[in-house]
Image (cartoon, rainbow, N blue to C red):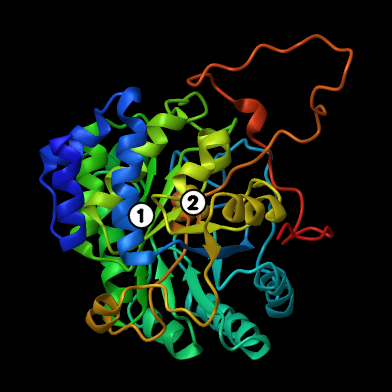
């Protein structure tokens, strides 16, 4: 396919594809899917080899947010039955982070719900960062606390934060349909404040919220312009009790095309497969490793991911390797350009929320002998059975999944 040859050539040269080329990736047929994955996989291998960076989420403060982001289970008025708790103490957060690091994570993402931190919150998170770094000075720490005020990014950087996450989530033209309590420009401003403070910027998107292909291409092109070091790609988990609960728009094939498009547009950036991968990619998750070079280990903010051991097995079975602490994630040229000390980076979750996911738990075991044989689900069927609210790890007495 001429399109794919062109996109590979451009990706290897770090050249921006045209919008038409990006749209054409999203419009490819299922017959062409493996060719698309193979082409984007060549670009991924050029810049990141077969390494997979593991990141670990710690939800410092869960639920009860005054903002109204429609996709978020922690939003104002959310009826989702998620864990709700106020700030973890630094030692509690550090303990949760240690579980992720022991599981192979080289980055810990500290996330708190809310519009943005107060100065007191920044103090609190600074103490948490110090506690984590005392235990393990090599671990990268990314903060995700919402909209930042003047000077807060500098203070986080001084406390030892390596990165800051704030996602654009969707296109500027549709942003107002998703959230009314802050603007797209507010989000851009916060990412730029983080960059100005020398933090490695992490900013990404959420697919599956009813957006058009043009919206997806718009937000990914905006991200390329903003030039974060890492781009988390979330797939909406339509939580019951949120306005987008009925938005089951993704198939595994569509999710792969979106990841491929992001890789072609942001070839040398850490593309992170984030919330919703188990729910929407399902058995095609290993193919996504050919596109993304980074994933979250274990659970998400308010929902459960597959077991950490299953993540590690999947990486090994697919012929990839977990990126060690001795390796720098970003290619040399980006490190030179970014100037953000600790290397690339980053982390997930939109403004403190997005992310999440789950499995069904509670319900049933798999097929076991004598019961009726179940029909396979269609690729575009709503898989509410795969969404499980997080009930372990941070904010509970149960061990975290790592
Ligand atoms: S994404 Fe963040 S700011 Fe928006 S509702 Fe969720 S926790 Fe609040």
Which residue appears at 54% of the width and 49% of the height?
318
In depth, the one of 372 and 96 nearer the eye is 372
Residue linked to disc 1: 204
In the depicted structure, whether residue 293 falls above or below residue 149: above
Q: Quadrant of residue 170?
A: top left
Which residue appears at 70% of the width and 47% of the height?
390
Residue 335, given in percent of the width and then of the height, sits at: 30, 80
Assess whether mark 2 and mark 1 are in contact (beta carbons under 8 angstroms): yes
Tell me the quadrant of the picture where the C terminus can be found. bottom right
Residue 58, given in percent of the width and then of the height, sits at: 62, 64
For label 1, count other residues whose C-alpha is less than 10 Å away and answer few (under 14), some (14-19) or many (20+): many
In the depicted structure, whether residue 153 falls above or below residue 55: below
- Residue 282: image tag: none
In depth, the one of 273 and 391 nearer the eye is 273
In the image, is the residue at mark 1 within 8 Å of ligand 1 by its beta carbon?
no
Tell me the quadrant of the picture where the N terminus can be found. top left
Residue 54, given in percent of the width and then of the height, sits at: 55, 64
In this rendering, the count of numbered labels is 2
Lower sequence index among marks 1 and 2: 1
Residue linked to disc 2: 274
Residue 160, given in percent of the width and then of the height, sits at: 49, 87
Can you see residue 68?
A: no
């Amino acid at each position: 396919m001429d399109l794919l040859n062109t996109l590979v050539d451009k990706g290897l040269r770090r050249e921006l594809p045209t919008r038409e080329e990006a749209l054409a990736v999203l419009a490819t047929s299922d017959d062409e899917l493996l060719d698309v994955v193979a082409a984007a996989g060549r670009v991924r291998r050029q810049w990141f080899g077969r390494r997979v960076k593991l990141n670990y989420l710690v939800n410092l403060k869960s639920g009860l947010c005054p903002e109204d982001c429609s996709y978020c289970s922690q939003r104002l008025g959310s009826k989702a039955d998620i864990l709700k708790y106020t700030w973890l103490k630094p030692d509690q957060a550090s303990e949760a982070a240690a579980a992720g690091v022991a599981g192979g994570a080289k980055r810990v993402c500290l996330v708190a719900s809310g519009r943005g931190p107060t100065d007191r919150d920044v103090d609190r998170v600074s103490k948490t960062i110090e506690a984590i770094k005392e235990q393990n000075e090599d671990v990268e720490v990314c903060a995700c606390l919402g909209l930042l005020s003047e000077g807060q990014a500098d203070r986080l950087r001084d406390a030892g934060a390596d990165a800051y996450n704030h996602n654009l989530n969707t296109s500027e033209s549709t942003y107002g349909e998703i959230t009314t309590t802050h603007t797209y420009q507010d989000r851009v401003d916060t990412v730029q404040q983080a960059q100005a403070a020398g933090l490695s910027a992490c900013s990404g998107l959420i697919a599956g919220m009813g957006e058009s292909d043009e919206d997806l291409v718009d937000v990914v092109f905006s991200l390329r312009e903003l030039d974060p070091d890492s781009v988390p790609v979330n797939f909406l988990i339509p939580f019951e009790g949120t306005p987008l609960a009925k938005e089951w728009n993704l198939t595994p094939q569509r999710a792969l095309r979106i990841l491929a498009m992001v890789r072609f547009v942001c070839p040398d950036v850490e593309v992170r497969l984030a919330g919703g991968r188990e729910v929407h990619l399902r058995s095609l998750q290993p193919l996504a490793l050919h596109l993304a070079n980074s994933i979250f280990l274990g659970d998400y903010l308010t929902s459960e991911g597959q077991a950490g051991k299953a993540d590690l097995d999947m990486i090994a079975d697919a012929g990839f390797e977990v990126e060690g602490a001795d390796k720098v994630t970003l290619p040399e040229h980006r490190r030179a350009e970014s100037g953000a000390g600790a290397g690339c980076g980053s982390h997930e979750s939109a403004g403190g929320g997005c992310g999440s996911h789950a499995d069904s738990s509670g319900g049933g075991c798999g097929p076991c002998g004598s019961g009726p044989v179940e029909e396979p689900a269609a690729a575009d069927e709503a898989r509410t059975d795969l969404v499980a609210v997080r009930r372990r790890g941070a904010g509970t007495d149960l061990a975290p999944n790592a």
